Amino acid sequence: MPTALITGITGQDGLYLAELLLAKGYDVHGVIRGQSNPRRELVERLVPDVRLHNVDLTDLSSLMRAMRDSEPDEVYNLGAVSFVAYSWENAFVTSDVTGLGVLNMLEAVRLHAGNDPASVRFYQASSSEMFGKVQEVPQNERTLLWPRSPYGVSKVYGHHMTINYRESYGMHASSGILFNHESPRRGEEFVTRKVSKGVAAIKLGRQDEIVMGNLDARRDWGFAGDYVEAMWLMLQQPEADDYVIATGETHSIEEMLSVAFGHVGISDWRPYVRQDAAFVRPAEVDHLVGDASKARRVLGWKPTVGFEELITGMVDADVAALEAGWR
Ligand code: GDP
């Protein structure tokens, strides 16, 4: 039975990946930060077979201990300070966790693997935010990186360090450049979930409006459940490499609002949406759309959930949760 260690187990991707690996028969370990992490209970409820280790990505010795105690064949580094807007207000902590945290992980894996550096396979969660002010459309693995936030800059550091460790030490270290991926488990600070939850609450008469930022931005939104499959596929390849994972379709925030409100029978969303400068970012990423043809060719990966299905599914999940009193 292979063993996997996942950082970022409390997040959307960590949970989907843990479910995927458990279904494949893996022994799954997760690392969790903080003395009384409020999301611990959620992890224990959703994936009770995952063994949890108390670790902080900024603390190399805690990572070394988790490596020793879990003896993983595969390590998935999904842990990060991941909200772009927050990263301007907390640039240092973002750099520490999202950037230097990757170096700590790579060092922990390298030191643990000893004489056989490729014996532990490593996945780094890189991000389409690295493309930022996009230098070509669509973006692929060779597109020049131009990050537009402390989060994006930190992810670029982690991405290049992963490549550098692969090239310097012969590690089996792969980097997945994942475009935005969403689900009913997405954090409520992200725009898709903010909209799905807001629309559900408006439908049920519990909220009057959604207050938002820039509605012109475009993203390539896929389903997180599809994207964790790509992570796993990368680590099953004989050679480590970098892959863009995306749907190849781009939609604006306005289109998303139209789909979400339309799904609950509201054809004109404008009276329900107010814009506020508080949600506008110091620098914006306007036109992300990925070219995932390499992943399709080499990994045989393709997305299964389209934009409308993704957004309407999230609205349905939030309506059900609000009605059941879960949230
Ligand atoms: P990101 O791509 O990781 O930054 O994902 P987000 O879901 O946080 O943001 C996606 C886009 O939605 C960005 O271009 C935001 O500027 C835009 N956006 C517009 N209004 C909002 C809002 O109220 N909240 C968030 N999170 N994003 C918003």
Image (cartoon, rainbow, N blue to C red):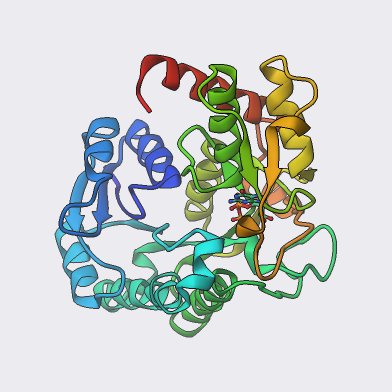
For this orientation, the residue located farthest to the bottom is 168
Q: Which residue is at 33% across, 47% downward?
A: 10
Most foreground residue, 240 or 200 = 200
Q: Is residue 190 above or below residue 286?
A: above
Q: Quadrant of the N terminus?
A: top left
Q: Which residue is at 19% across, 70% downward?
A: 62
Most foreground residue, 167 or 243 = 243
- What x and y, as percent, mark residue 46? 29, 31
Q: Is residue 28 left or right of residue 195?
A: left
Q: Quadrant of residue 41?
A: top left
Q: Is residue 136 above or below residue 232?
A: below
- What x and y, as percent, mark residue 166? 49, 76
Q: Quadrant of residue 259?
A: top right
Q: Is residue 115 above or below residue 263?
A: below
Most foreground residue, 100 or 87 = 87
- What x and y, as percent, mark residue 161? 50, 79
Residue 121 visible somewhere in the drawing: yes
- What x and y, as percent, mark residue 22? 32, 35
Q: Quadrant of the C terminus?
A: top left
Q: Is residue 104 left or right of residue 182?
A: left
Q: Which residue is at 28% across, 72% downward?
A: 113
